[in-house]
Amino acid sequence: MSLLTSPAEFTIKRPAFVRTSAIRWVFSHVTRHNWIILMVFLGAFGNAALAAMVPVLVGDAFNAMLQPLPDVSVLLPLALLIGGTQVVRGVLQLGRNFGAELLGQRLEAEIRDELYISLLGKSMTFHSLQPVGDTMARATNDVREINLMFNPGMNLVIGSFFFLVMPILAAPRYHPALLITPVLFAIAYFASLARYLQNLQPISDEVRAAFGNMNSHLSESLDGVETVKGAAQENAEVERFVVNAKRVRDAFITQGDTEARFIAFLLYGIAIAGGLTHALFLFREGLLNTGQVIAYFGLLRMLDFPTFTSTWAYTQVSMGLASARRILELLNRKTDLDQNTAGHTGEMKGEIEFKNINFAYPDGSVVLENISFKVKPGQTVAVVGQTGAGKTSLVRLLNRTYDVTSGQVLVDGIDVREWNLASLRSQISMIEQDIFLFSRSISDNLAFGKPGATQDEVESAAKAAQAHEFIETFEKSYQTVIGERGVTLSGGQRQRLALGRAFLTDPHILILDDSTSAIDSATEDLIQRAISAAAKGRTTFIITHRLSQIRWADLILVLRKGRIAAMGTHDELMQTSDAYSRIFQE
Ligand code: M5T
Ligand code: MG
């Protein structure tokens, strides 16, 4: 069977990234692009060095002009040199910007990939506890924040860092004492920056969390929009949304407030005034000439780049790190499900045994108790019981949507946890109670479990599932798009599409969670025929209320409040079990 060898999407091997802390994790992504980093640093350094050339050369030009006999001949070469350096500087700046953009975009794509694969590999326990909207916010906006952290964030941080360094490197050229101002500025700048970032971190965390929260409520109320409208709860939902939106707004305002308190501008003003006074003082002492004072002043002016970018470039970095923490938290949250890639693979016969199993959902309430039964390959089992009895929960243990709390579920005598998960699941087909169809064509939906299926295969599966006829009534027949952008289907039609899916994947175990009760008799008849065809040659579990389907089952399990109240064939149970006969009197 070809399905055995096709790897499930979530077992794809990915390069391993360090996931111990947000910074290390981002770093382990970054270091895969060493040449880009080199480009960014070289670009940033060269850009700053050439920017520093301008005041230095202008100072030289002033000195040439201020000679008792002005030497005009040096002016043209100096002007050409300034022009030339700035052209080169432009190229280097481009390299820095391009590198940072490239890095940002690559990391965004890589991290989104990593997150998506990780999400597919997580257990249902994880997914049922994690709101979709919040996951969406993390997979879209938070990943985007990491991109922005590199460009413009880190791009400007690195770029402006060298602008801070240049005056320190160039000032001693004129007088060693001139180091004082740029060095003091740098110390004060980094000290206040450290404090600023410390204050900013919880605020950035709150901004991202508030956004995720708003998103999850939004997606929930859009998901449930029918219910909201049906209950005329629009206003209440709007109010809830306003509360969430306010929280996001408040978080941003607090962030702006903190930004506004950052004292870099004050430091810059003090540095310019102090540095100039210092230089003029040295001038009066005869230790500097006019051109040198002008050059030094020009060098100090370079500090405006780190000053201006510092408020928002560091905010961007802080936001990026907050987002990285949120993504990492999701990546690291326990999967609870071992894919057991080294586990048993092989063609399933379809023998099933439940051995003394107990089961509780993660929140703790016991749902199934002390369940034991055996099914031979090819048999059909009907599971009946009142709503909430645990029917859906029972069949979910077969393909390890959830794992038992105690006891064992055996397939072909092997504990399902000992099976290679991909192999197990590819041979069990489950038609859920509420059938999910993707907003893709009918053909794609049918072939979901077998992406390479030919049109012929798809059609014959649809015919076997009694779906061909209604599909043909659509204008675009198999190419009709379902859902958001296309037609919507009735419950009975969905069910037959789902059966078609099952025919295509040709599973060894088929599970049908069919609790749709009210269907007209013509459709009922079609579905009935489709199901009997589907059940042929495989072990089948049917959860149903329809007597017509229960009757021909080889084994009927009657569940009551999570326990087996009775089990046997229809005829046996009609005679022996009150619980069973009661079901048909409901
Ligand atoms: C059995 C609880 C549910 C009920 C019991 C699916 C699900 C159910 N439950 C959870 O706590 N978390 C869950 O994710 O388990 O529920 P069931 O197995 O869905 O019952 P059923 O299939 O027999 O009912 P129905 O209505 O589909 O016929 O207490 O709260
Ligand atoms: Mg159910």
Image (cartoon, rainbow, N blue to C red):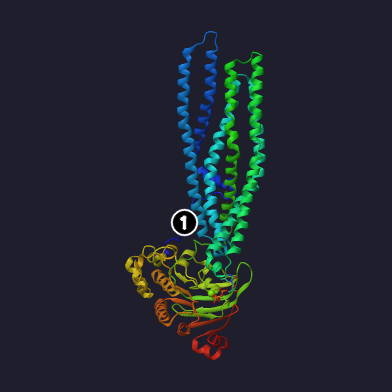
Residue 307, above or below 580: above
Residue type beneath disc 1: Ile
Q: Position of residue 210 (x, y in %)?
A: 61, 54
Q: Residue at the spot x=43%, y=82% of the render?
A: 521
Seen as rendered, the residue at the extreme top is 69
Q: Position of residue 544 (x, y in %)?
A: 49, 79
Locate residue 446: give its quadrant: bottom left
Q: Is the N terminus in the top left, top right, bottom left or bottom right quadrant?
A: bottom left
Q: 327 and 18: which one is in front?
A: 327
- Element under disc 1: loop
> Looking at the image, can residue 309 be seen?
yes
Q: Residue at the spot x=63%, y=53% of the render?
A: 247
Residue 219, above or below 566: above
Residue on which the image places disc 1: 12
Q: Residue at the spot x=63%, y=50% of the render?
A: 251
Residue 313, above or below 415: above
Q: Is the C terminus in the top left, top right, bottom left or bottom right quadrant?
A: bottom right
